[in-house]
Image (cartoon, rainbow, N blue to C red):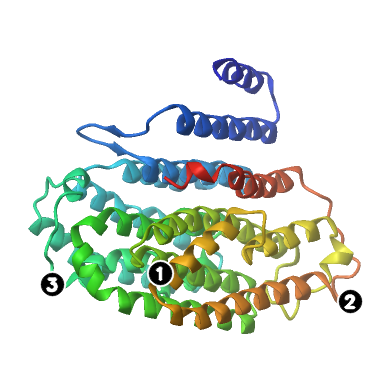
Amino acid sequence: MMKMMIMSIMSIILMKSLPMIMMTMFIMMMMMMFYMCNYSNINIINNMMLMDMISMIMLLLTIITMMLIMISSSKFKSITLTIMPMFLMLMSMFLMKNVMNFYILFELILIPILILITMQGMQSERLQASIYLMIYTITASLPLLVSIILMKINLSFTILNILMFKFNLIIFFLLAFLIKSPMYLFHLWLPKAHVEAPLEGSMVLAAILLKMGGYGLIRFMPICIKSMNKMNYWIISISLIGATATSMSCIRQQDMKALIAYSSVAHMGFVLMGIFSMNYNGLMGAIIMMIAHGLSSSALFFLVNDVYFKYHTRNLMLFKGLLIIFPNMVFWWSMFMAINISAPPTINTFSEILLMSSMLMWSNYTILLMFIMSLATASFSLSLFVNINHNNNSFMKYSYFNSNQKMYLSLFMHMIPLIIMITKLDLLMF
């Protein structure tokens, strides 16, 4: 293992091409992940930080997303001052042991994403999207802050595992995480933020920021598990109905970016159902779904941005005929549309199997809505693929664009982990 690492470092030093350097670093990181999981007992605890399998998974997802943004972005140098502090705060938050420090970093990440949307967004509605994001997040976070203060500031996650905190209004305690997820009925900030954010903002939102809510719920679950057992009927019912409704609403969306944003709401509703089902299958399915959705949704936003950059439109009614004018991209659209509907052999398939089995263990009556949701997801994914790639468009018929090495490398690096991880699912089923 050490010899392979040394050879990889030497190859990075000798390389001059940025895409090849990033590809080598990506392979190194994957090797380190498998080595750490196979040959070490990951449970690093000290006074400041706590690292277990959940922290490590979220940390690796953050690092992968950072590398993908570096490859995908055409203006990474101009937004480095915004992106780099955000990723440092994200990595620190996933490692925090102290609850108050976790809360501070959890809320501090709002500032870079607001700056990114407000300063790098291209439309006038970006101010409205920033206000939506700020109001939703701050309003929901105040009850969480009051609850943490009442529990004592120096409380740590290791103590939470043996403490049952009796809190009657537990919905207000968890509201900050439900909105960040986002849960249906509290999701209106997400489509606005996605549509107005630049490519880098959309990739960060889809890959990392939506997972902060699920991570917080998993961390805080031990202190309120009795109260969650009383309210999980409401949360699961709302999430199931909301995931079905948003999947069906995607069929009529005309803006491709809004369509993918609403599909993210449906997928994260599935994650909330798994967490609140209170069984092993649901929890493992939710964690695997967060990884799968983070990579696949980020790739879809990159594909939509590529279309918008070339043709200056995201309207499905105006854009057609990609198969004629840019046939190389049709392969990637087909792959990620298949991944979006959880086609094998990807970890999306396994995560949905686990989540559906956990829902059936919770109640047999959920099978009807899950069937409708799966059908609607397949319908809008196939409709999006057919509308973009087929038919003729006289306005775009004679345009042609050369392939881009960085673009293909980014899409390849989005797809490979989703397929490779299916061969080592025992690393994720901890």
Disc 1 target residue? 273
Residue at 33 percent across and 63 percent down: it is 278
Disc 2 target residue? 394
Q: 49 or 397: nearer the eye?
A: 49
Disc 3 target residue? 168
How many neighbours does mark 2 have within 10 angstroms: few (below 14), some (14-19), or many (20 or more)? few
Q: How many marks?
A: 3
Could you say where residue 227 lies in the image, as x and y percent from the top left?
19, 69
Could you say where residue 173 lies in the image, as x and y percent from the top left?
21, 66
N-terminal-most mark, 1 or 2: 1
For residue 141, side relative to residue 293 (left or right): left
Q: 356 or 33: nearer the eye?
A: 356
Q: Residue 300, which numbered label?
A: none
On the question of residue 389 being in view, the answer is yes
Residue at 11 percent across and 56 percent down: it is 149
For residue 314, side relative to residue 210 (left or right): right
For residue 214, side relative to residue 257 (left or right): left
Q: 318 or 301: nearer the eye?
A: 301
Q: Quadrant of residue 158?
A: top left
Residue at 43 percent across and 55 percent down: it is 284
How many neighbours does mark 3 have within 10 angstroms: few (below 14), some (14-19), or many (20 or more)? few
N-terminal-most mark, 1 or 3: 3
- Seen as rendered, the residue at the extreme right is 398
